[in-house]
Image (cartoon, rainbow, N blue to C red):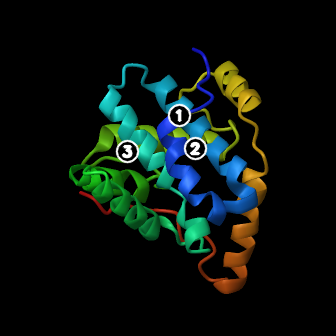
């Protein structure tokens, strides 16, 4: 399977947020693109509609790190996604994309509404977040090829920077984005 270097829809969405993302832009864009490659690798027969949903969710899934300067970013991220969906007459996808974004840091397998894309997204994000240490069914050679084609560009250092901010802001809640249980039954 070849690496997709660019998803035009993702690039279009992220271009709007480039000023807010600033120096972290390439790192975030590459993270989004890597995880979408992992999604498509895990589910090569995704429909065009499913791929478009994943691209939109991926573009927005961590966006509030920059728009709201906070590690507790899931709710504002999917709220920003909702605005995009409404502006593009795609509001009928709101619930599904909200679940995908809100559950992408669930610590165990997601089972609930919209499970197919949500679990796929969660697994792909974890592959990239772990820098390929957690493979979740993605071939090691493909992970390495994707990482080579789409460099980290400081993305994980950026996550550490936000984590330290959170630690100083609220030392008793250092990782508020983690989901221990599924809230969508």
Q: Is residue 127 above or below residue 146?
A: below
Q: Residue at x 42, y 55 (%)?
A: 101
x then y, percent, for residue 168: 72, 83
Q: Quadrant of the C terminus?
A: bottom left
Q: Which residue is mark 3?
A: 118
Q: Residues within 10 Å of mark 1 (few under 14, many from 20)?
A: some
Q: Is label 3 or label 1 in front?
A: 1
Q: Residue at x 62, y 83 (%)?
A: 172
Q: Quadrant of residue 169?
A: bottom right
Q: Quadrant of residue 138?
A: top right
Q: Is residue 70 above or below residue 16?
A: below
x then y, percent, for residue 92: 20, 51
Q: Which residue is mark 1?
A: 7
x then y, percent, for residue 56: 42, 46
Viewer-side residue, 69 vs 90? 90
Query: Would residue 98 appear left or right of 2 to someone viewing this image?
Result: left
Circle 1/circle 2 CB separation < 8 Å: yes
């Amino acid at each position: 399977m070849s690496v997709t270097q660019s998803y035009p829809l993702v690039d279009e969405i992220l271009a709007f947020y480039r000023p807010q993302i600033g120096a972290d832009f390439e790192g975030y864009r590459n993270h989004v693109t890597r995880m979408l490659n992992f999604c498509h690798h895990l589910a090569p027969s995704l429909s065009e509609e499913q791929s478009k949903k994943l691209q939109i969710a991926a573009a927005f899934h961590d966006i509030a790190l920059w728009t709201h300067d906070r590690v507790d970013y899931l709710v504002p991220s999917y709220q920003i996604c909702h605005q995009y969906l409404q502006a593009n007459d795609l509001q009928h996808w709101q619930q599904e994309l909200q679940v995908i974004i809100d559950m992408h840091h669930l610590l165990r397998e997601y089972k609930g509404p919209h499970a197919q894309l949500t679990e796929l997204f969660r697994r792909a994000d974890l592959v990239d977040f772990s820098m390929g240490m957690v493979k979740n069914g993605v071939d090691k050679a493909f992970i390495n090829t994707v990482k080579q084609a789409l460099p980290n560009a400081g993305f994980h250092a950026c996550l550490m920077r936000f984590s330290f901010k959170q630690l100083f802001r609220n030392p008793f809640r250092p990782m508020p984005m983690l989901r221990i249980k599924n809230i969508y039954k």
